[in-house]
Structures are given as C-alpha cells and as structure tokens.
Amino acid sequence: MFDLYGRGWQMFEGGLVTIQLCLSVLPFMILLGLLGALAKLSRFRALRAIGESYTVIIRGIPELLVILLIYFGGTIAVQRLAEVFGGEDVRVDIPAFWSGVAALALVQGAFASEVFRAAIQAIPVGQIEAATACGMTPLQIFLRIKLPQMWRFALPGLNNLFQVLIKDTALISVVGVEEILRMAAIGAGTEKAPFTFYLVAMLMFLAFTTVSLIVFNRLEKRASRGIVRA
Amino acid sequence: MIEDLIYVLSRYHMWLWQGFLLTLQLLLVSIIFGTLLAIPLAIGRVSKSIWIQAVPFGFIYLFRGTPLIAQLFLAYYGLGQVISEIDGIRESWMWAYLRDPYWYCLFTFVLNTAAYVAEIMRGGIQNVPNGEVEAARACGMSQPIIYRRIIFPRMWQIIWPAYTNDVIFTLKATSLASTVTLMELTGAARKIVARTALPYEAFISAGVIYLIIVYVLTFGFKGVEKYLRRNETRETSKKSVVPDGIPG
C-alpha cells in the first residue's frame, strides 16, 4: 500500500510540480493584484473602470473555463502572431505548464487586487497627508508609506488566496500538466486502483494547504509584532 | 471572428442552452441540500463539548483543504470502482444510478457546499450578540426555541453577504462536472471546441452566460439582503462581521 505499486516516486514528482506551479503563479499574482488595486484607486475614471471590470469578469467565470480558454486560445493567438512575423510554417506550442500559470495568475490577480485595495485603504489618511506635506510625490508615497505597511493588512487575505491557489493548481491537470492529480490519474488508470491513488492525492493537497496555513499564520504574527493589541 | 461567432451560436445554441439548464440544476440542488446539511454541522461546530466539535471540524477541514476536483475524482472513479465490485450490484436496479456521473457530481458538490456554508454559519452563530441569547434564556426559552427564534434569524442576517459569495463559488464549481463527462455549460463549450476548433467563440459564449447568471444571482441576493436587514435603522453600520471576501 505505501509504495503505491512502485509509483510513490511519481506522486512525489507530481508534488514537486504542484509546488513549482504555486511558486510560479505567486509573483505574477501579486504583480497583477498590485496593478489592479492601483487602477481601482486611480484618479482616472478609465483606469478605475478597467480595474473594476477585471475583477467583475474574473469573479463570474469558472477558473476551469479561463484555463481552457488560455490553453486552447493562447496557442492560436501565438500561432497567428508567428504567422505575421515568420511566415506560414511555424509550429508554436505554448507549454501547458505556462498557460496554466498564466490562467491562474490572471484569476488570482483579480482577487488579490481586492485584497490589496482594502489593504491600501486601511492605511491611516493622516500618514498620507503627512507624506504629502513633506513634499513626497505619489510614487514616493506609494513606495515608502503604502507598500511597506500594506502587507500587514493584506496578509490574512493573501493567506486565504494562497489556499485557493494551491487547490486551483489541481485544475491544470485537465490540460495535461503532470502535477499531483494528473499523476494520480495515471497511477489510477494503469494500476486499476483509483481509490488509493486519489486518496493519496487528496492527502497530499491537505498537507500542502496545512503547511501554507501554518506558514502564513507565522508571517501574520511576525508582521504585527510591532502592533499593540487592544 | 464575428462570422465564426454567429456560426457557433446558430449551429450549437441548443447545446449551450441545455448546458445552461444542467448548470442551473446542479447549482440549485447543491445549494439547497448543501445548506440543509450545513445547519447540523454548524450547530455541532459551536458545541461546547470538544468531542461533538471534532466531527464537523474534521469534515470541514478535509473538504476545505483539498481541491474539489480531487474530491470529485475520488468519488466518481474511486468510490465508483469500489461500488462496482460489490457482488451482484450490476444486476440490481440501482446500477443505472450508481454508474451515472451525475449523481457523483451532486454527491460531491453537496458535501463540499455543506462544508463551506457550515464554516460561514459557524462565524455567524458566534457573532450573534450574547445579550440576546441570554435574554432569550432569561425568558425561559429552551435551546431549540432559542435557535429557531433568535440565533438563526440573526445568523442569516449576518452571513448573507458571505453566503452570496459562496453561491457564486458553487456556480463556478459546477463547471468541474465537465471533467467527468457531464454536458453542463463548460462541458458544452468544450464539445463545441472539439467539433469546430473555435476556442474563443465557444468559451467566451459560455463565459458570458456565466456572467449573466452571476449578475442575476447577485441582484436577487441583494434584494433578499435588504429584506433581512429591514429592522435596521439607517444609522447603524452596515459592516458585516463575517469578512465577505472570496470563500476559500
């Protein structure tokens, strides 16, 4: 049972791919989230509209649909682009891994932008006014005052988002990326033991989300170490 | 691009329509039975006895900590195989149901929704002002009556925004039924893509339908929220105690 018909190693490799997926999405998700939050808080109406519709659209569409759209549609888009530049016979394939990363970053970025928006707004107005009075430019205010302080307010939201992200990576198995669930499917198919393999996959995900929860709770404690609780 | 869209819609709109109906059906059943199942879970979760707490806690932790798609595969492929190996099950009348992915989807979605809603309800029950419960007890109400008259009405008022979010989350979750060959909205779009090789047209059409459903749901739930909060005066803060971010 414990060597999983000699496929324990495969499941382990699947676990590594899942970790890679999560860590690859994370920077893009934070970047998109920050850009989205800035757009929503912008002085310009057009930027605000873009930021808001980004969240509204992504919030209403299933993650699976976004993944499929980027995987199948992305190849065609790149192909057309390549035809413009390189003539007829170019075969382009976007690796499933990166199309999955792009899709998840797009989805999680929309939710992250909400988290960051709230976090930026949680910073006391007095501090912004003081910085303005000191003659800082909006960019300086963002980099020196808002960005360093907003993490404390954003961490609980990010904790939640990272949990969702870990679980959403399982969806990328649908386009063939060999992460935990895909490996489990391969094992289940060849060894005719679906119950065992999917149970192991679920326990692996449970372990990942638990570890993420513990790490984020530590971070939250660390981030608020200078704050006196009422 | 426009011609392709017209082609897809004129030729395959019936698939999308049937997918839409199946999506709504999955959503409705999951929400109704999931919520009903969540109520005892939430009550157990706020129990003072640690042993009664432990069961719903484990259930909620397991379902919230693992991907829904893994749960679905475990139910459909894993449980499905275990059931198919029972002696004589293939000859019994139940077999027609036991091999249908539809029932496995509903089974998984209901349990999953129950776990998420129970956690929201727990937050709601714990945020009912203690004075109200004490006052009810002082009036001599028994625990079931306190739940029915005081705690549940208050809880719904508190959790409604978070509950709305969870309904939308469940709607999006129903798209996973397409991975076990059900032809709901996403499944229909995938089938159209397989036929026509027009991914943008098919997936974006499905996406727009999802957005319309979400819009209508949000609108309806906002109306109910107003009704639930009809006793509140305008001065009181509208801030909900349960954070209404994304459920996860």
Image: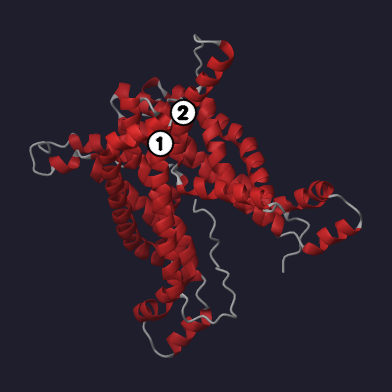
Establish whether labels 1 and 2 are both on one chain.
no
Contact, CB < 8 Å: mark 1 with mark 2?
A: yes
x and y, in percent, of residue B50 in the image: 45, 63
Task: Say which mark, if any, is on residue B212.
Answer: none
Image quadrant in which you'd find residue B164: bottom left
Q: Can you say whether A173 is above or below B175 in the image?
A: above
Task: Say which mark, if any, is on residue B203.
Answer: 1
Q: Can you say whether B71 is above or below A188 in the image?
A: below
User: How far apart, in angstroms, are the residues tagged by discs 1 and 2?
Assistant: 9 Å
x and y, in percent, of residue A46 in the image: 65, 49
Amino acid type at mark 1: Phe
Q: Can you say whether A9 is above or below B45 in the image?
A: above
Q: Secondary structure at mark 1?
A: helix
A123 vs A203, left or right, is right
Q: Chain of mark 1?
A: B
Residue visible at 31% across and 51% down?
B24
Q: Residue furthest right?
A: A134
B83 vs A22, left or right, is left
Q: Residue furthest top?
A: A89
Viewer-nearest residue: B221 or B89 = B221
Look at mark 2 in the image and give the residue it sits on: A73
Q: Chain of mark 2?
A: A
Residue visible at 57% across and 11% down?
A86
Viewer-nearest residue: B205 or B225 = B205
Q: Secondary structure at mark 2?
A: helix
Residue A101 appears in view: yes
Residue visible at 63% across and 47% down?
A216
Q: How many marks?
A: 2
Q: Can you say whether A75 is above or below B112 in the image?
A: above
Viewer-nearest residue: B25 or A192 = B25
Amino acid type at mark 2: Gly
